[in-house]
Amino acid sequence: MKSQSAIGLALTWDGARWPLRSLPAAARAFLRGKVAPGSAEMEQLLSGDQVKELRICWVPRLKGGDEVLNAPFHTADGLRMNFRATASRQFGDVLGVVYRR
């Protein structure tokens, strides 16, 4: 598994992935091409403490269903991961937030 220090996601308010192609160009640029892998690989990266930055574009929608990212995962030390919001930008009705460890 390759290491990835930053991951970019577009998520709805309920944690469902949103298609990047539907985001404004500025929001896609905000994610800086660091698009997240599938859910299983993302869980491995996070639980292995390999992610130092999350760039999330929050899309004001609710999607629901099985594809929401709400499944728990275990970290190496069993503790909660501590990400803090360090910056934010608004792209129309989409909010981009940078979370860092």
Image (cartoon, grey):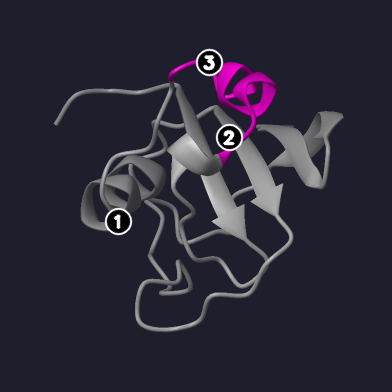
Q: Percent x, y for residue 56?
A: 62, 40
Q: Give the mark nearer the N terminus: 1 vs 2.
A: 1
Circle 3 sits in a helix, a strand or a loop, which is it? loop
Relative image position of residue 34 (x, y in whole percent): 43, 22
Farthest-out residue, left = 1
Quadrant in which the N terminus is drawn? top left
Q: Residue 100 carries which label?
A: none
Amino acid on which the number 2 mark rests in the picture:
Leu
List the residue tagged with mark 1.
Answer: 39
Sooner in the amino-acid sequence: mark 2 or mark 3:
3
Q: Which of 61 and 7 is in front in this view?
A: 61
Alpha-carbon span between mark 2 and mark 3: 11 Å
Residue 32 numbered mark, or none: 3
User: At numbered mark 2, what does the secondary structure look like: helix, strand or loop?
Assistant: strand
Number of labels in the image equals 3
Residue 94 shown in magenta? no
Q: Measured from the top left, where is residue 54 in percent x and y?
A: 58, 34
Please report the residue visible at 74 percent of the width from the left and 61 percent of the height from the top: 60
The kind of residue tagged 3 is: Arg
| Amino acid found under the numbered disc labelled 1 | Ser
90 left or right of 4 in image: right
Q: Name the residue under label 2.
A: 54
Magenta span covers which residues? Answer: 23-33
Q: In which quarter of the image is the C terminus?
A: top right
